[in-house]
Image: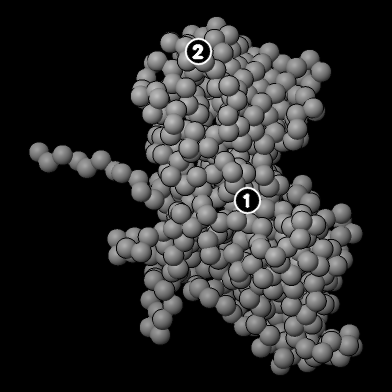
């Protein structure tokens, strides 16, 4: 029979077949996968009908697409369990007749597994589904069925801020592993801000030598009587390390989108090159959080020479068509008092500093477009007039995204509610790690609909998807990053992958409980994790 994987059908099948999922007797019900597949075709109930797969399993590759299938096989093989003596095979095929180019069909029976992808990417997603099944069942597949699956949105993203707190290459890779498991395909890497510059730029070595470190870090939230830890904090990624991370992501079919903040959030850069400011400094890399009035000077050509040089080195490292240039929270105080900025406004016929920011962004965009890339920025880039080809990331609610889509610009939705994962996950915050504030619980994330009301179908087509943002002011360790990201990342992944008719929060929670065994086995910290207490002797 052929059914949709809906919660009602799952519940009905569960009542009819009162056996547990992990019983060696196969159960006729959909698998507890995250995100939920679009369709599942179940076989008839067959006792003891299961197979095991491991590193001894043979791969059969599509002879017409052997290279692409070989890459997927090379990715999949090391993740299969060693020591399993299995005669079952894994066949990998690419067939462009699969409905969606990133879709896949996963079939398995006693004889083995066949994964057919609409492309190499679709084939990879099928492999990720297979891995989830195997990881839940100690290398076994307990009952034969077919999964037919495809993504709903093209942009299924997660962000990570490494400026406020620095994370190692190994930790970035573990973060990418999470994205891959949930079939998320964009990693928005926030590399620069007031508190640290994290990417090597060979033409400007002081960016990392000076801007890559701060003298100390604020303890707690900003207040009138601020306290600091007195510990130097920092680090940066060499260009070789950036290439390593980009390659690691590409193996998992994840696009890395770099963010280089401008014209605001630039204190770390100005600490290294104060002549790029309106006042000339001096400055230090920021040690506290918030918005700072010193920003890149829009009146100096030297500023644009510097930024285009930086972006040239960045664009050479990242294959992504998109380059994120920030554009958010840029105070205009210094520009109002700066003779060079005021002269620029007069010469360019700009009526206010908001139009000066638009001038700034448009000038940067022209250079980026000449390199064959597209800029994307936070929704403040709408102020004063949006650059002609820019995409918008809507974070201050949905209004910016709606305005951009109506104007024919591509949009990534990322409203603070519910897509900011630095907000609390519970109202009982006394025992929670300190967070920036706010409240974005799991059910709110799961209920999110990325396409705002009021858009025509043609306008809605400009909504590429959405992403979750992880700002790390209050996340000094990677364990804390995953604690704040999980399980909300899994909920957002299902929002972006699974069509609404196949979503159900109660069913999601049941699947999540099964899925936590994978997170536990792989050593990830997450909200709601149950830690065994040591017995008292």
Left/right of residue 310 with respect to residue 468 in the rendered view: right
Closest to the observer, 212 or 486: 486
In the image, farthest residue toward the left: 537
Q: Earlier in the sequence, mark 1 or mark 2?
A: 2
Closest to the observer, 131 or 206: 131
Residue drawn at (87%, 54%) of the image: 372
CA–CA distance between discs 1 and 2? 34 Å
Q: Is residue 354 above or below residue 303?
A: below
Residue with the mark numbered 2 = 51
Residue drawn at (84%, 87%) of the image: 350
Residue drawn at (9%, 38%) of the image: 537
Residue 209 on image: x %, y %: 61, 63
Q: Is residue 13 above or below residue 303?
A: above
What's the mark number on residue 237?
A: none
Specify few, some or many for label 2: CA neighbours under 10 Å numbering under 14, 14-19, or 20 or more. many
Residue 403 position by quadrant = bottom right
What secondary structure is marked by label 1? Answer: strand
Q: Is any atom of residue 207 visible in this view?
A: no
Q: Is residue 246 above or below residue 59?
A: below
Specify few, some or many for label 1: CA neighbours under 10 Å numbering under 14, 14-19, or 20 or more. many
Residue with the mark numbered 1 = 157
In the image, farthest residue toward the top: 87
């Amino acid at each position: 029979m052929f059914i949709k994987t809906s919660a009602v059908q799952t519940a009905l099948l569960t009542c009819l077949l009162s056996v547990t999922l992990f019983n060696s007797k196969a159960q006729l019900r959909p698998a507890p996968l995250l995100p939920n597949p679009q369709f599942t075709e179940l076989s008839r109930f067959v006792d003891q009908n299961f197979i095991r797969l491991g590193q001894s399993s043979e791969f059969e590759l599509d002879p017409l697409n052997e290279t692409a299938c070989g890459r997927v096989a090379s990715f999949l093989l090391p993740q299969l369990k060693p020591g399993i003596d299995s005669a079952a095979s894994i066949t990998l095929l690419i067939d462009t007749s699969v409905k969606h180019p990133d879709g896949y069909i996963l079939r398995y029976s006693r004889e083995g597994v066949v994964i057919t992808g609409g492309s190499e990417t679709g084939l990879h997603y099928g492999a990720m589904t297979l891995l989830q099944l195997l990881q839940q069942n100690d290398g076994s597949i307990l009952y034969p069925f077919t999964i037919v699956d495809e993504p709903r949105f093209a942009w299924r993203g997660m962000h990570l801020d490494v400026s406020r707190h620095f994370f190692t290459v190994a930790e970035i890779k573990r973060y990418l592993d999470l994205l891959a498991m949930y079939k998320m395909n964009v990693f928005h890497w926030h590399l620069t801000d007031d508190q640290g510059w994290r990417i090597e730029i060979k033409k400007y070595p002081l960016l990392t030598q000076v801007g890559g470190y701060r003298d100390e870090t604020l303890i707690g939230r900003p207040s009138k009587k601020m306290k600091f830890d007195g510990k130097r904090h920092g680090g940066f990624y060499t260009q070789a390390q950036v290439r390593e991370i980009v390659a690691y992501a590409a193996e998992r079919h994840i696009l890395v989108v770099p963010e280089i903040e401008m014209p605001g959030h630039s204190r770390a850069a100005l600490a290294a090159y104060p002549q790029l400011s309106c006042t000339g400094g001096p400055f230090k890399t920021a040690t506290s959080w918030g918005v700072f009035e010193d920003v890149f000077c829009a009146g100096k050509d030297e500023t644009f020479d510097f930024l285009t040089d930086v972006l040239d080195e960045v664009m050479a490292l990242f294959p992504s068509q998109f380059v994120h240039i920030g554009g958010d929270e840029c105070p205009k105080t210094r520009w109002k008092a700066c003779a060079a900025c005021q002269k620029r406004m007069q010469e360019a016929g700009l009526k206010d500093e908001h139009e000066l920011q638009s001038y700034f962004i448009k000038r940067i965009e022209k250079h980026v477009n000449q390199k064959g890339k597209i800029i994307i920025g936070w929704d403040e880039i709408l102020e004063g007039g949006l650059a002609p080809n820019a995409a918008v990331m809507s974070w201050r609610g949905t209004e910016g995204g709606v305005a951009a889509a109506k104007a024919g610009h591509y949009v990534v939705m990322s409203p603070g509610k519910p897509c900011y994962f630095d907000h609390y996950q519970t109202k009982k915050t006394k025992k929670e790690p300190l967070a920036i504030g706010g409240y974005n619980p799991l059910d709110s994330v799961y209920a999110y609909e990325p396409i705002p009301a009021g858009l025509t179908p043609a306008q809605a087509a400009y909504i590429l998807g959405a992403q979750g943002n992880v700002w790390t002011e209050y996340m000094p360790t990677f364990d804390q990053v995953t604690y704040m990201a999980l399980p909300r990342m899994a909920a957002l992944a299902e929002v972006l992958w699974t069509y609404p008719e196949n979503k159900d929060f109660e069913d999601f929670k049941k699947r999540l409980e099964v899925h936590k065994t994978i997170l536990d086995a792989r050593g990830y910290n997450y909200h709601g994790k149950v830690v065994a207490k040591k017995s008292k002797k």
